[in-house]
Image: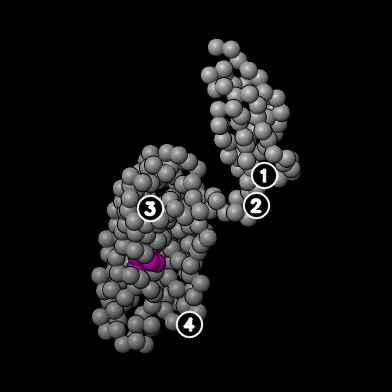
Amino acid sequence: MKERELNNRLIMHENGRTTKEKRHFFEPLSISKLVLPIFNEEKRYRIQVENDGQELRADLFEIDQEEDELKPLKQVENLIEEVKAGNLKNVKEILRKNKSLVHGKNALGFTALFYAAREGHKEIAKFLLQEIGVEPNVDDLVVAARAGNTEIVELFLSKNNLDINGLDSSRNTALMEASSNGFEKIVRLLLAQDEIKVNITNYFMKTALMMAEKPEVVELLLQNPKIDVTVKDFEGYTAQKRAEKVKNQALVELFKKHQNKTPVSS
């Protein structure tokens, strides 16, 4: 086929940059000329091209800078909405087109994996970890523990680089959240980790033991050789003194049972 060259053609690149370059069309297009509007090379445009069989006409639409900057955020938010809804098929399709969105954060600063962990969508979390290669962070682990999503906590604990003692954006650890919410299975999982630190304090100087209210969870914590029952919160109360103050007799009895405990280094 005979090739026809058209000069001074406007090119819109993937990164949004516009240039004038030589382009080529083949004879079957039957184009005699290209009509280009005047454009400012300092601005960004969307281009719409129409072919009426006689000429190729390009219409330019200036891109609003603010709108263009928000586009990636909107794409991330769309991905997160599909994750929240548990739509694995749609999540796969979105990431097939743009894998980098998996690392994007919404206006609150959280990623798709965070919402998979929060909502308990194990298959989506598994897909993100095992097929996309995402690494969970402290926020992901803590929110899974807070929500009681045991299987997702197990998935995260299988990752070697995860700091299981890290404080999330609320200044709590996974053990604190699981203990506070009475999720016994997750507490057991966390206490079984060699690197677990049980006496970390949060913003209010409270430990996991101080935050626990369910007797079964308190018992688990008191059985841990690293536990320190003498730690005081910001008001000067130990976990036992707090239980006595609120007249939680079941917990008071547990503390008395373990009152001679001497903690090992945590």
Figure check: 227 above or below 28 = below
Marks 1, 3: nearer the viewer: 1
Residue assigned mark 4: 236
Q: Position of residue 218 (x, y in %)?
A: 30, 71
For the point 25% across and 80% down, which residue is it? Answer: 250
Report the magenta residues as a range. Answer: 175-179
Q: Secondary structure at mark 3?
A: helix
Query: Which amino acid, by three-letter code, is at mark 3?
Result: Glu
Give the residue at x 49% y 67%: 171
Q: Quadrant of residue 172?
A: bottom left
**Which quadrant of the figure contains the C terminus?**
bottom left
Q: Do labels 1 and 2 touch, CB within 8 Å?
A: yes
Residue 89 in the magenta stretch? The answer is: no
Q: Which numbered dot is residue 2?
A: none
Left or right, residue 174 beside residue 103: left
Q: Which residue is label 1 attached to?
A: 44
Amino acid carrying mark 1 in the image: Arg
Instruction: Look at mark 2 in the image and give the residue it sits on.
Output: 65
Q: Are marks 1 and 3 in contact (CB under 8 Å)?
A: no
The mark nearer the N terminus, 4 or 1, is 1
Q: Residues within 10 Å of mark 3 (few under 14, many from 20)?
A: some
Closer mark to the observer between disc 4 and disc 3: 3
* Gap between marks 1 and 3 measured at Cα: 31 Å
Q: Which is nearer the N-term, disc 1 or disc 3?
A: 1
Q: Quadrant of residue 176?
A: bottom left
Labelled pair 2, 3 in contact (Cβ < 8 Å):
no
